[in-house]
Amino acid sequence: MANTTCDCPAPSCNTTTPVLPEAVIKVFTIDFKAPDITELMGPRFEEYKNGQVKIDVSVVSGFDTLFSEIENDARLSLGLFDVFITPPTIMGSVAPYNGFTDLTTYIQENYLEEWLDIFPGYREIIASYNGKILMTPFDGDLLHLFYNKEILDYYNFDSPRTWQEYNDIAEQVHGKIFPPTNKTLMGSCIGRLPQCAGPYWAMQVLSSMTQTKGSSEGSLFDTKDMSPLTNDALVETLKIFEKQFKYGHPTELEGCLKINMPAMKDEECVLTLNWGNAFLSNLIPGKLGIDKAPGSQKVLDRETGKLVTCTKELCPNAVYYDDIGFVNYAPYAAFGGWSGAV
């Protein structure tokens, strides 16, 4: 009988063959989203697949580059990547070239209950194209109002319901030294660096005046004839911005989203806007307030281009307050959230 005893040194006696992944899934996204995949989703999926699948992440910097690479991959049928993690705004440029897999049958047969748990606007509009499910939403990204509850309570303010109230609060607290912290306050903190999120802040204000009956009627353009919905509404939006800037963060024009929340964390900022999931970071435990974005008491008359007082007839979805009357709100899914496509 042959001698099967291993005479090699102890460390070399390990004859266990390492498990190699049977498949590599190539994921393409923007640089700052990579940690979500490499540190969270990727390792969990690899563990779920018992190491038989490896997640390989490729990244680029800047949305322009991200979108152009995804569109080129679709136009040229390159198939360089298996999964795209991207804002869904790219879908209209990719779908005509069949750049994303139709997931309709797969979801209906395997995850219909979970799919129906997603808000209709996201699953039927943002995630779908011509009736086909092409993307799966990861989050919704509705803009919200964030505020320091301790500061508002100290000065006897409620959460602002309108843009006018937002600016009034910002004006009255800006520059004051807050006794509990001995810090100088900034009324509003919204980053306005060009080519950043500025259009989102503008559309949130503008749409509260131009859109009264839901997204089907448009907020920047009238869906009946694509005429621009600007006129007096845009002028009023600029006036609101002027005051926000006057009582805002001193470097608003030099920063992007890093202006909005860090000053809130430092308990120097009183009011800001940001995406809803920002509360997850729990910046100021017990002090961070969150509410729907402010609305407007005036709305655009689409026939005259003038602003008129919001009424139940003009604003059927408005909220009525005993002291100020009807206020129109237009929840804004700025950016559309993050979605995955195959």
Image (tube, rainbow, N blue to C red):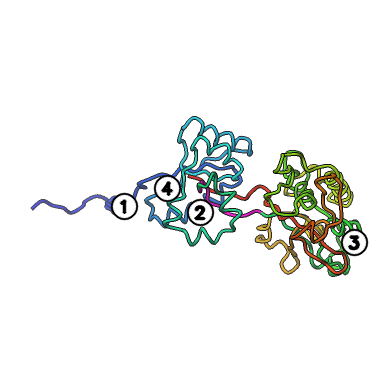
The secondary structure type at the circle numbered 2 is: helix
Residue 131 position in % (x across, y down): 52, 47
Query: Magenta region's main secondary structure?
Result: loop
The secondary structure type at the circle numbered 4 is: strand
Mark 4 vs mark 1, CA separation in Å: 28 Å
Q: Is residue 187 visible?
A: no
Residue 15 located within the stretch drawn in magenta: no
The secondary structure type at the circle numbered 3 is: strand
Mark 4 vs mark 3, CA separation in Å: 54 Å
Question: What amino acid is at disc 2?
Answer: Met
Labelled disc at residue 11: 1
Mark 1 vs mark 2, CA separation in Å: 34 Å
- Mark 3 = which residue? 177
Mark 4 vs mark 2, CA separation in Å: 12 Å
Mark nearer the viewer, 4 or 1: 4
- Mark 2 = which residue? 41
Q: Nearer the viewer, residue 63 or 104?
A: 104
Mark nearer the viewer, 1 or 2: 2
Residue 27 position in % (x across, y down): 49, 43
Residue that appears at 28% across and 54% down: 10
Mark nearer the viewer, 1 or 3: 3
Residue that appears at 66% across and 47% down: 335
Q: Is residue 275 visible?
A: yes
Mark nearer the viewer, 4 or 3: 4
Mark 3 vs mark 2, CA separation in Å: 44 Å
- Mark 4 = which residue? 54
The magenta stretch is 133-141
Tell whether 232 sits left or right of 214: right
Q: Nearer the viewer, residue 74 or 69?
A: 74
Residue 112 position in % (x across, y down): 47, 59
Cβ atoms at labels 1 and 3 below 8 Å apart: no
Cβ atoms at labels 1 and 2 below 8 Å apart: no
